[in-house]
Image (tube, helix red, strand yellow):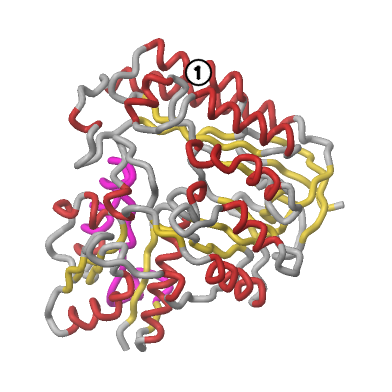
Amino acid sequence: MVRVHVETYGCTRNKADGEMMEAILVRAGYELAETPESADYVVVNTCAVKDPTEKHMRERIKELLDSGKRVIVTGCLTHVNPHVIDPRVSGILGVKSIDRIAEAIETAERGGTLISVEGWRERSIDKLELPRLWKSGVAFVVPISEGCLNACTYCATRFARGVLRSYKPELVVKWVKEALARGYREIQLSSEDTGCYGFDIGTNLARLLDEITAIEGDFRVRVGMMNPNHAIKILDELVEAYRDEKVYRFLHLPVQSGDDGILRRMGRNYTVEEFEEIVRVFRRKIPGLNLNTDIIVGFPGESDEAFQNTVELVKRIRPDKVNVSRYSARPGTIAAKWKQLPGWLVKEHSRLLHRLRLQIAYEINKAYVGETVEVLVHGPGKKGGIEGRTFNYKEIILDSGKSGEITRARVTWAGSTYLRGVVV
């Protein structure tokens, strides 16, 4: 029997795509291999959001091919920069062609190569109609849409995912109910931008959350990243939906820059003031909010003053976590054509911001020491002990706990990136 291993990189959205492909392969009669070494074929479900990520994808594909494995490439790299994919691969599928994964292997077995990288205009599938492989675990990813409504000048992901296509609320709710019935306790709502969910079908994220939290049972919902220009349109309704105890008090709201001029060059369609307004409203009405944001350092045209504006914004809003990325030009994007900043300056600014974000995160987390918090236990952690998530989705390592249970723990230690605690 042909054995296949699916290796997924990148976002939770990609994780869901990977599980769909696994289910399709099982239905087609293939055996899933737990490791690449034990597989005949390795499906590399790629990410291409940054240049270093793309380089890692290229190296990984080459490594597998050099070891004698037959490789099928899927994911965003197939759209963003297909020319860098090793020509020795046995098949290439775009993100809208994952339903053809079994066909790709059948073609390779006959000595052919299936290449299907149609864009969203040529081919579109409703992925919630595809099967999923049910694995043991606490968290289950439910995609709510694909694509976005933005046109950021630096982003190549939109070349892969296309324009927003929201999935019907009844299908999303159906998958949530199925996951809960199978024992999952955490639902992760995933999309390129959850904030614009439903704008194309006459609904929105807040209403979807209301439908999900109305489902019976003791479970938690983690809402994925949302862009400020969409979140602000439904702000009051959204905050009200977040007040339900089933929703983690976790907000991933990327600002990307603290300078309005750079935001305009990025094509972000909001101002720093609008971003701060969203944060103010959420913090006023959602106590204990865990605020995560993203910042790109070294964007073309970023002056020392513009960078300092970003530093001052971070000091003002004091996010729990800042994902700092050094700008890297992506093929086909507008920003790639502009004059790039010197690498040494980008590194210097990145290091400065990284030190600041760790300092702020530690000061925030230190305030939790001695507090008793609600925790959803996930299971054995990579840092040792038992990993869990607090009521606001902070990572905490416990002394004990059973996967899937909701317990209470006293925080005994804090670092910049996680907490430690004991069950009480």
Relative side of 371 to 81, left or right: right
Give coordinates of residue 393: x percent, y percent: 66, 47
**Measuring 41% from the left and 10% from the top, which residue is drawn there?**
305
Seen in the picture, residue 134 relative to 197 is either above or below; the reply is below
Q: Quadrant of residue 365?
A: top right
**Which quadrant of the structure image shows residue 234?**
top right
Bounds of the magenta segment? 33-62
Q: Residue at x 38, y 83 (%)?
A: 31
Residue behind mark 1: 311
- Front one among 414 and 211: 211
Q: Does residue 314 appear to the left or right of 37 in the view shown?
A: right
SS class, disc 1 = helix
* Crowd class of label 1 (few under 14; some 14 to 19; many from 20; radius 10 Å): some
Of 366 and 19, the residue lying toward us: 19
Q: Residue furthest front?
A: 202
Verify whether residue 45 appears in magenta: yes
Is residue 126 visible from the viewing direction of this image? yes
Q: Nearer the viewer, residue 302 or 109?
A: 302
Taking the spot 40% from the left edge, 67% from the top edge, the residue there is: 18
Quarter of the picture containing the N terminus is bottom left
Give the residue type at disc 1.
Answer: Val
Q: Is residue 1 left or right of residue 204?
A: left
Report x, y in % for residue 266: 34, 30
Q: Position of residue 411 (x, y in %)?
A: 79, 41
Q: Position of residue 394 (x, y in %)?
A: 66, 44
Count of labels in the image: 1
Residue furthest out toward the right: 424
Residue at image point 36% right, 72% down: 5
